[in-house]
């Protein structure tokens, strides 16, 4: 089996931020930011599924939409099929500049080079027309199958529209392609001439998938594709998605709050909390040896369909804090069961604790130690689970 | 046995035809038991619990037949006289002529059961609360309705002037001044103060009034004395509270009459009329309490009391800063917080049965874990029976003792939770269990049930599951399988099994 790194990268994100301004007063002056996504970096490889999990309000959906530029990012870069040497250079530049590299404002040579690279590769710097060429490669399936299909269009028109916009093939070819797409997602030719309201939730989600597949994409962002569906239908949709991935070498960014579903679909899982990535690991590693206390709590909270199994629960106190005013230091420290004095002061760096397993928590200090952390009591040993 | 539902039919009469949402549903709930009802969207789970509380919108819906026995009273008594349902010739449609006076009377009777008997947690907490009233107003309404006499008794009896109170205030103030005092100690002293006054909610109030952040250098003695002064009730206020109390007693008596009517199965018109007349006479002799501007001022002690009782209730559902939440409006709260408020509201009257309609579906897993733990604790503490509705079988596995699996308006399997998950009998249950992804079994194949839920206007003949069933036989198309007893408290409706039919 090929390891993840063997496959070329489809999409790379570096330091992506999305702040929504909070406006108030008579003149609508900005009084603050909702930091929905705050410095996220990740790579998605060809034909692989990256699972993105977290509670509601942690910025999962915003991230998915930002990387397709359905929402304009505040800062950061996204690269579509970047050349490996460029990516390498970029990462060294980022390492030299530190985590808070501003995007092309100051005048240091590193920043200039970074800006140049971004100018030529980042999809966040593309103009509208250039962006449209990419839309076919990067697609999305939305969460709500009831809100994401126009009620005035026939299924045929919905699935055909991307082909029309991108002028693909002759009319007859497009019609054939639409039929082919419907077949791929398990719908029949008779469904062509119906309106979305005539379908059940599961069937609508299939239409959404067919539409996303129309332009032969390389990456599909699946934004909670099954959370509005029943389990039996959810299984149908998941199976379709798996088969399509095998046939067409699709890469998925699978956004879900349902960890068991992510477990069934993803190869790499990313856990987000309040706009930041707290842990990233291959799926087995994450589920058997979760490192971050948040991940551990999240996993212990999943109800299992087996009354014989009684597990120890980690109950997190309180609610997710507001992303408009995130806690200082580690953002999880207000609810963390293993909180230490250092947590409220210093933001934990992301550390590769085991090969491929990244975590941002003071329980797992980097080899060099956290700066200014020496004076504080030493962290507890990593809990083995 | 606190709830016994027999052969319940609920139909919706729409322009497209008659939707047979419930078609012969029977189950029982024992005392202190948690019953889970699971099934796909549109299988009639919610309609079942809405029928139990008679919350089905009528028109278009109607409970057509069946029995709902709650502690010996048939909640559906008099159903057949509420409406006449006649088929229209040659059209295949039906005409429903409702007798609205009788329907209203039946609804009035339900007030004897709603709240203290059966209460409910609704699916969408943000939809279930009134956006224009703060949380304590809405929770307080429940308190006034179901524990009103106790609440007013407390207010009438409270005596802030006795020497015991002064001593208790002194002790609490001393503790509050000392920064080393732990909150638990302060809470205990505040509770003693509440007891000395004779109003437990004053303990909560004193506890929050003496928080260090609240005091900010002010002498706690003054604060407590000021708070205690507000408990003094003037003579006029006192007579108002007595009037409110008398009204509540009469309203309770009226509910008692209704409950006897439902238990005996006959109207007690004379008794009802005498209570209603007494109520009317009371209102007439005290008409001045209804004068505009007067009522609201007199209401003040009551409002204050419900605020602090609400705070105590919110503490019970583990809300971190209950005073702030009690004064907040629903839109200011997150989904998890609102759901906890809803649970507090449903539990405030200490019901015999709690119906929970998808209480955690809108919530995140971590909050869901909090809420489920909370519900389990409450069942153990109060002994409430819970009917839990969810499409998530994992939630049922966590909290339920017994499970009913519903499909297209019928119960197809009823079993203790352990047996059901270890050995599902009905093919539909098997399909459901096979389609759940499990994080502890990543390599499990996800088998889906082919097809989708049938249309309930023209449901499939015979067994309603036969078009999707992998084991379908010729007989399944023709006959409806009876519910058969399979031993060990299990029953199933499927021709694959040959137990003795369950007699209702």
Image: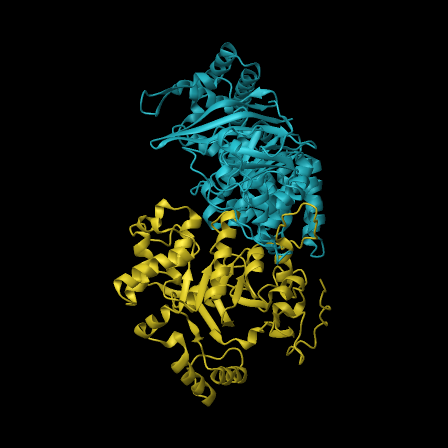
Q: Residue at x 56, y 53 (%)?
A: B446
Quick one: B312 or A220, which is closer to the camera? A220
Q: Viewed as shown, does residue A267 lie left or right of B378?
A: left
Residue A23 visible somewhere in the drawing: no
Residue B244: x, y in percent? 52, 25
Left or right: residue B152 versus residue A191 is right
What is the total number of numbered labels drawn onto the structure image? 0
Residue with the most extreme left position: A171
Q: Position of residue B232 (x, y in %)?
A: 58, 34
Quarter that holds the N terminus of chain A: bottom right
Locate residue A34, reporting x and y percent: 45, 63
Q: Is residue B451 above or below residue B47?
A: below
Figure colour of chain A: yellow
Chain B, colour shown: cyan
Q: Is residue A39 above or below residue B93?
A: below
Q: Position of residue A45 (x, y in %)?
A: 51, 72
Q: Nearer the viewer, residue B156 or A381?
A: A381
Near-viewer residue (A269 or A195) = A195
- Res A207 seen here: yes
């Amino acid at each position: 089996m090929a390891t993840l790194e063997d496959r070329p990268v489809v999409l790379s994100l570096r330091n992506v931020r999305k702040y929504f301004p909070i406006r108030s007063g008579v003149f609508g002056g900005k009084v603050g930011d909702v930091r929905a996504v705050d410095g996220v970096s990740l790579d998605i490889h060809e034909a692989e599924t990256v699972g993105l999990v977290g509670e509601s309000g942690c910025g999962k959906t915003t991230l998915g939409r930002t990387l397709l530029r359905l929402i304009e990012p505040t800062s950061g870069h996204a690269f579509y099929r970047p050349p490996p040497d460029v990516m390498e250079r970029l990462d060294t530049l980022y390492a030299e500049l530190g985590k808070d590299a501003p995007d092309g404002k100051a005048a240091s040579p590193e920043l200039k080079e970074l800006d140049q690279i971004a100018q030529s590769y980042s999809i966040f710097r593309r103009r509208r027309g250039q962006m449209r060429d990419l839309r076919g490669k990067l697609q999305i399936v939305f969460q709500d199958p009831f809100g994401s299909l126009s009620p005035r269009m026939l299924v045929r028109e919905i699935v055909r529209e991307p082909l029309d916009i991108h002028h693909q093939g002759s009319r007859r070819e497009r019609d054939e392609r639409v039929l082919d797409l419907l077949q791929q997602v398990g719908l029949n030719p008779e469904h062509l001439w119906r309106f979305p309201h005539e379908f059940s939730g599961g069937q609508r989600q299939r239409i959404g998938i067919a539409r996303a597949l129309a332009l032969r994409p390389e990456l599909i962002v699946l934004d909670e594709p099954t959370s509005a569906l029943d389990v039996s239908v959810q299984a149908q949709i998941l199976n379709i998605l798996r088969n399509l991935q095998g046939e067409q070498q699709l890469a998925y960014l699978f956004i879900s709050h349902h960890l068991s579903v992510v477990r069934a679909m993803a190869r790499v899982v990313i856990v987000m909390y309040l706009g930041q990535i707290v842990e990233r690991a291959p799926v087995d590693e994450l589920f058997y040896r979760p490192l971050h206390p948040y991940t551990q709590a999240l996993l212990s909270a999943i109800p299992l369909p087996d009354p014989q199994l009684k597990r120890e629960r980690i109950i997190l106190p309180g609610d997710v804090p507001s992303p408009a005013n995130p806690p200082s230091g580690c953002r999880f420290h207000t609810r963390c069961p293993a909180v230490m004095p250092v947590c409220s002061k210093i933001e934990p760096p992301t550390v590769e604790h085991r090969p491929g397993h990244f975590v941002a928590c003071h329980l797992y200090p980097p080899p060099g130690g956290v700066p200014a952390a020496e004076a504080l009591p030493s962290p507890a040993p990593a809990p083995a689970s | 046995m606190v709830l016994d539902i027999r052969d319940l039919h609920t139909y919706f009469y729409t322009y497209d035809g008659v939707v047979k949402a419930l078609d012969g549903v029977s189950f029982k709930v024992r005392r202190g038991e948690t019953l889970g009802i699971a099934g796909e969207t549109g299988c009639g789970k919610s309609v079942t619990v809405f029928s139990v509380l008679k919350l089905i919108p009528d028109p278009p819906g109607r409970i057509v037949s069946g029995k709902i026995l709650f502690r010996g009273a048939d909640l559906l008594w008099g159903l057949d006289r509420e409406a006449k349902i006649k088929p229209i010739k040659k059209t295949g449609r039906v005409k429903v002529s409702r007798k609205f006076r009788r329907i209203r009377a039946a609804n009035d009777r339900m007030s004897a059961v709603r709240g203290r008997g059966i209460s409910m947690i609704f699916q969408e907490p943000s939809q279930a609360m009134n956006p224009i009233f703060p949380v304590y107003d809405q929770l307080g309404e429940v308190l006034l309705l179901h524990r009103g006499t106790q609440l007013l008794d407390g207010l009438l009896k409270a005596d802030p002037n006795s020497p015991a109170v002064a001593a208790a205030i002194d002790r609490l103030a001393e503790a509050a001044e000392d920064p080393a005092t732990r909150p638990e100690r302060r809470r205990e002293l505040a509770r003693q103060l509440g007891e000395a006054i004779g109003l437990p909610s004053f303990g909560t109030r004193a506890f929050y009034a003496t928080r260090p952040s609240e005091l900010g250098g002010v002498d706690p003695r003054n604060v407590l004395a000021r708070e205690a002064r507000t408990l003094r009730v003037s003579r006029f206020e006192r007579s108002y509270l007595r009037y409110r109390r008398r009204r509540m007693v009469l309203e309770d008596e009226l509910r008692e009459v209704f409950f006897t009517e439902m238990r005996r199965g006959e109207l007690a018109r004379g008794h009802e009329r005498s209570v209603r007349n007494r109520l009317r006479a009371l209102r007439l002799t005290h008409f001045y309490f209804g004068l505009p501007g007067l009522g609201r001022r007199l209401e003040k002690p009551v409002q204050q009391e419900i605020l602090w009782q609400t705070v105590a209730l919110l503490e019970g559902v583990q809300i971190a800063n209950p005073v702030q939440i009690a004064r907040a409006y629903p839109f200011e709260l997150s989904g998890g917080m609102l759901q906890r408020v809803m649970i507090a509201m449903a539990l405030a009257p200490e019901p015999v049965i709690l119906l929970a309609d998808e209480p955690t579906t809108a919530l995140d897993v971590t909050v869901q874990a909090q809420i489920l733990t909370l519900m389990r604790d409450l069942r153990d503490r109060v002994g409430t029976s819970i009917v839990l509705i969810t499409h998530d079988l994992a939630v049922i596995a966590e909290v339920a003792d017994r499970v009913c699996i519903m499909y297209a308006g019928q119960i197809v399997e009823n079993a203790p939770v352990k047996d059901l998950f270890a050995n599902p009998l009905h093919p539909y249950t098997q399909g459901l269990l096979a389609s759940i992804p499990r994080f502890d079994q990543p390599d499990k194949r996800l088998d889906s049930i082919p097809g989708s839920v049938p249309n309930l206007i023209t449901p499939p003949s015979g067994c309603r599951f036969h078009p999707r069933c992998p084991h379908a036989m010729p007989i399944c198309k023709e006959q409806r399988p009876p519910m058969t007893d399979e031993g060990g408290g299990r029953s199933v409706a499927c021709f694959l099994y040959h137990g003795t039919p369950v007699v209702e």
